[in-house]
Amino acid sequence: MQKKDRKKKSRFGTLLIVLGVLLLAGAAALVIFNKWQSMVAERESAAILEEMEAAMQEEHLHPEEYIPEGNAEEADLNMPTVTIDGYEYIGRITIPCISIDLPVIAEWDDQRLWINPCRYTGNYKTDDMVICAHNLDSHFGGLLGIGIGEKVTFTAVDGTVYHYIISNRETVQPTSIDEMIQNMNNAKEEGGLEDWDLTLFTCHLGGQTRCAVRCLRVEE
């Protein structure tokens, strides 16, 4: 009986070792895949930025007007776009401290998010724009540890540059959409949350919560 018990324990121990090795191999493969995916995304973003710059400099360019939902009657709030590879872009987001310089797509969905950061809602002209991206190192992964007071710029495709500083970093539940997008300029009057003019957000590692980085617009 003791001999059989030892054999069972030995087989069980071997099984645990094999499972441990497989888990480590899976984790390593995931890290490698994420790194590869991040490098591919970085190259594609750089190519799109070059195309965007070229399109903006062409004399015959007539950017399509993008009309934000709910503001169709206000022509001065229209956001111009340039179209590259079938997607409309409204500008570029630059965060020097984490080496981010990325084009921003006018609308978001799951497919677009794997290409570049996307406008989730709002408008840079009304200081309530929200931009989302995946937490790849080459996208918004650096936001997870970014410091307060760091500089951010958004450059619209018409060449207008908007300057911001990071004022707050919050953890938001995936279901708390109102908390993510509510215009804090209005909430402040109700004794609500901190004021902000631009929000950048991505998922925390594991995807259970979101990191929302709030920014205030400042003079250059």
Image (spheres, rainbow, N blue to C red):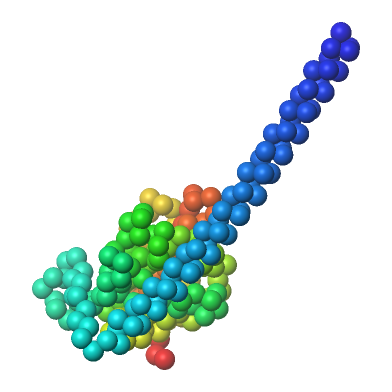
Residue pictured at 63% horizontal, 43% vertical:
26
Q: Return the residue nearer the eye: 5 or 168.
A: 5
Q: Is residue 7 above or below residue 109?
A: above
Left or right: residue 8 versus residue 188 is right
Q: Return the residue nearer the eye: 59 or 167.
A: 59
Residue farthest toward the left in the current orientation of the protein: 73
Residue farthest toward the bottom in the current orientation of the protein: 220
Q: Return the residue nearer the eye: 179 or 63.
A: 63
Left or right: residue 104 versus residue 20 is left
Work out whether residue 122 can be spotted.
Answer: no
Count of all numbered marks drawn on residues in the image:
0
Q: Quadrant of residue 11?
A: top right
Q: Quadrant of residue 51?
A: bottom left
Residue pictured at 57% horizontal, 67% vertical:
145
Indicate the position of residue 68 as horizontal and vertical percent values. Answer: 21, 69
Work out whether residue 204 can be spotted.
Answer: yes
Left or right: residue 122 versus residue 64 is right
Indicate the position of residue 7 as horizontal and vertical percent values. Answer: 83, 17
